[in-house]
Amino acid sequence: MWKSLISRRNALAGGIALIGGTFWGTNNPSLASPVNARPYPWGGSGAAGANPNHDPNPLPPGEPGRDYNPTRTPNGSTLSYHLVENVKVMHLIAEEVEHEFAPGLKARCWGYNGQVHGPTIEAVEGDRVRIYVTNRLPAPTTVHWHGLIIPSGMDGVGGLSQRSIQPGETFKYEFTLRQHGTFMYHSHHDEMTQMAMGLMGMFIIHPRGVPQQERPDRDFVLLSSEWKIIPGTYRPDPNEMTDFNVLTFNARAFPGTDPLVCRRGDKVRIRLGNLSMMSHHSIHLHGYHFYITQTDGGPIPESAQWPETTVIVPTGSTRTIQFVADNPGDWAMHCHMLHHVMNQMGHGLPNVLGINPDGLDNKVRKLLPNYMTMGQTGMADMGSMGMTVPQNSIPMIGADGPKDYITMGGMFTILKVRENLPPGQTSDPGWYQDPPGSVAQPASTEDLRRDGIRPPTSNNSLQSHHH
Amino acid sequence: MVLLTLYRNSLLILGVIGIAGCATVEDKPGITDVQAMTQSRGIQTIQWNRATDTDSQVQTAIRTMLEDGLTVEEAIQIALLNNRDLRSTYESLRISQAELVQAGMPKNPVIDGSVRFVSSGGGQILDLGIATDFLDILFIPVRKRLAEQEFEKTKRQVAGQVLDLATRVRTTFYKLQAAKQILEIQKKFLLSYEAAYDLSRRLRAAGNITLSQTARDQAALEETKLALNTLETEVIGFKEELNVLMGLYGSSTVWETEQTLPELPGVTFDPQALVSQALQQSLDLQIARRNIETAAIRLGITQPMGILSELEVGATAEREADGLWSVGPTLAVPIPIISQGQPVLAKAESELHQALNTYYSTAVRIRAVVRTLYAQLQAARSRTTHLQEVILPLKQLIVEESQKQFNAMQLSAFDLLQAKNDELLTQLQQVQALRDYWIAYSRLQLALSGRLVQTEQTSTNSFTTPTSTTNGGH
C-alpha cells in the first residue's frame, strides 16, 4: 500500500496524486506463483501440496525492468548472474576482505566477492537459481539461505544439511524460488566467528507480474550488523558478546553510510535485514510515517499493517517498510538504540559528566603534557576536537553537516528527498536547501521581547553543587 | 695485656723522642712513597697536613669546592684532605719510621724490642729478654731489617686506606646521587597520585563515583607520601655519611651534589687483563709478602726473596682460564743462625707458614673478588642498557598510545596515569641499575688498584617504592 503522509492529510493542497490503496504483492491471487505465499492461519512453509524434497517446476527466468525494478543496496552491489538453460547461475566466493567501515576505520573481515557484506542476490519468484560457493577462507564454511523455503539439503547448515565446504572447495546450491520477499544469506558454520567477521548478505525475491505503477520507484536494501573492533586494531573480535562498538548499515558506519536518494513523490520501499550478533534494532525514520508491509515470513495483510515511525527489526529477521517520499528534506534514519549510533565508544570508563575540571589539566600536564579533561559535559565534541587518536580508529560520533557538526555515528543514514532530481539519479545530491524561514535559528532579541521569554543571564543556576 | 700496653707506651715514648729532635725521624716519613703508590692508582694528590698554616689553606680549598655543585672527584679530594681518620692513619707512617730508627739503636728498654721480635707471647718473653739483653748488639741488623719490613707494610696499609676512603666516598656519592634522582621520580609519582585523587574527588563531587572509590584513591596518595618520606630520609642518610667521610661539620655541611649519575661510560674493562692487573697492583699481596719476609727474617733465613720470587711468579702469571690453583712451594726451613730454643723456633716456623698461606688465600680471594665485581659490573651495565634502550622506550610508547586511547575515550584518566606510573617505575629501575653499575665500577677500580674489597650483592631495589602503583579500580 503506498501511502502519502501529505496527500492523506491534504491531498489537494499538497498537489500529490494519491497513489496506493492497492496492496501489491502475492496476496493478489491473479499472480502466477508456484505456491501461494499468503501466510497460513497456522503458519507453515507454504510448501503444502508439493513434495517437500523436490522443488516445484520453475518458471522462465524473470527479467529486470520487465518483471521488476531492481533494488539498490547503498554502499553495496547486486550479484550478477548469467542464464544457462533458463537457470540463473551465480557465484559467491567467500574470502578475506579488507573492508572500510567509514573513512579512517578499516579491518580485515570475511566477505563474499571482495566485499563486505556480500552482494545482494536478486531474483524473481519462480526462478531457478544455481549458486556456486567457492571457499577461499582459511576455515570451512557453508551458506544458509535465510527464510527461503527450499529442500532441506540446500539449507546450508553445516553438518546438518550438508558437509561443510572445505577451504579451496566449490559447492553448488540449486533450487527454485517459490516465494517472494526480503530474505538473507549467511554462513551457518562456526556462525559466531564467521558472522562476526561479516559473512552475510541479502536475498531479494521479487514477485512476478506486478504492473509497473505498483512497483516501488526506489527499493533500498539495508542489512544491519554489529562488530567489535578495538580502536587501533585491524580485525573484528569475534569473542565479543555484549560490548559491540561498530554498528552498521550494509557494513558501513556513519559518516560512511551512503544516503538514500529519492525524488519527491517516489514510491519508496526500504528492506531492513538484521543479522547482528546479539542486537535487535529499532529503526526510526524522520519526516515520515510508513507501513510495515512484509517480514521475511511473507507479506502482511493490508488489514494488519499499521503506521509507524520506528520499526523493530529483531536479529535474524527482515522488515520491509513503504511510504511515498512526499516530504522533501534531509531526513535522518537511524537505530534508536542510542549506543548503536556511536562509533567505537569505550564503555569501561568512569562517568566524568558534570565534574569541575578547573585546574585539573595543568596538574596532570606536569606529567602528561597532552592531557585534557574530556566528557565533563558529554561527548558531542568528541568527533570535532581533532585530538590524536589511535591509528585505525574513528571518532565516537559524527561528521560535519551543512549547519553544524552531526553528533551521530554507527547506524545512521540520511534519506534525501528532492524536488527536482533527474529520474534514476542515485548519487548524493548534496545537502538540502531549506526554504527561507524554515530552519531553526537563534532567537532574536525582538522575538524574545515580543513573546515574553527571559532566558537566565548566566547558566550558573543550572549547575548543582556537591560538597 | 700488660706487655701490649708497655709496647704501646714505649712506641709513644719513641715517637716523642723522635719529635723531640732525634735527627733520623722525619716530619712526614714515607708519604712520598705513599703518594707514588696512590698516584699510580688514580688518586691525584694526597696531603699530610700537620701544621696549622697549611690547614687553613686546605680549609679554604674545601670551602671553594663545596660552593657550587660538588662533583665526586671534589668529594674525594675533600675527604683525602680533611678526613681525620686518614690523617690519623698518616701518623702511623711516622710511628713506623720512628720504630725503624729505634731498631737501629741499642735497646732501651730492653724488654720491649725483644717482645716484638717474637710478637707478644707467653712465658718465654722473660728468658728471651735476658738473652736479648745479652746479645742485643748482635740483633741490631736483624731488628733493622724487620722494622724496614714494617715500615714498607705501613706505607702500603696507608696507601690502601687512602684508596679505601676514596672508594667509600665514590660509592656513597653515587648512592646519594641515585637517591636524589629516585626522590625526584618519587615526587612525580606523588604528582600522579595527587592528580588521580584530585580527579577522584571531582568525580565524587559530581556524584559519579562511590565514597569507597575516592577513599581508595586517597589511600594510594597517602601511601605515596610515606614512600617519599622514607626516600627523603635516605637522602639525608647518604649525605651525612659523606659529611663523615669528608670530615665536614657545622656550616660546611651545606652543599649540593652534581645533579645526576654519570651516563654509562663507553670504555669497558678487558676481562682477560683484570685479574693479573689486580694481582700485580695488589697492596694486600705486597703486605702479605712483607709478612713472609718478616717471618723468614725471624727464622734467620737470609734469602727469603728466593721463596718469594717463586710465589710472585705464581701469583701474577696465573692464567685465568686454567682453573687450577697452585698449592705453593713446600718450604724447607733452614736452620736458623741463632737457636732461641725449640718452642720459639716452632712458633716462628708456623708463623712463616701462616704468612705463606695468607699470601695464597689473599691471591685466591683477589681473583674471585675481581671476577665477581666484573660480573656485577656487566650485569648492571646490561640491565641499565636494556632498561634505557628497550624497556623505557616501550613504556613511553605505551604512554603515547594510551594518550591516544584516552583521547578516543577508550581509556580513563586513571588508566592514562597508570601508564605514566609504569614509565616512572622503569625510570626508577634505570636509576637503580645505573647506580649499581657505578658502585660495581668503583669497587672494581679499587680491586684493580690493588685493594681487596669485600664483595656484597649490590641491591637492585633497596629503595622504597610505592606499595602499589595501581590507581584505584575505576
Image: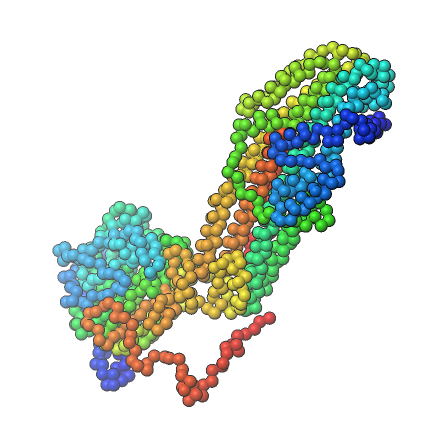
Vertical relation: B379 (above or below) B256: above
Q: Residue drawn 16% across and 69% down?
A: A209
- Where does residue A338 sit, x and y in percent of width and height? 40, 68
| Coloring basis for residues | rainbow
**In the image: residue B397, left or right of residue B309:** left
- Where does residue B255 sit, x and y in percent of width and height? 66, 49
**In the image: residue A56, left or right of residue B445:** left
Q: Residue drawn 42% across and 65% down?
A: A385
Vertical relation: A76 (above or below) B433: below
Count of number-bearing discs: 0
Place residue A262 in its image quadrant: bottom left
Q: Residue drawn 49% across and 58% down?
A: A369
From where the camera sits, is residue B213 visible?
no
Vertical relation: A451 (above or below) A105: below
Place residue A328 in its image quadrant: bottom left
- Where does residue A132 sit, x and y in percent of width and height? 22, 52
Place residue A298 in its image quadrant: bottom left
From where the camera sits, is residue B103 visible?
yes
Quadrant assignment for the N terminus of chain B? top right
Q: Nearer the viewer, residue B409 or B182?
A: B182
Q: Residue drawn 71% across and 50% down?
A: B251
- Where does residue B257 sit, x and y in percent of width and height? 62, 47
Vertical relation: B471 (above or below) B294: below
Q: Nearer the viewer, residue A195 or A287?
A: A287
**Residue ranking furthest to the left:** A85
Q: Nearer the viewer, residue A351 or B114?
A: B114
**Residue ranking furthest to the bottom:** A450
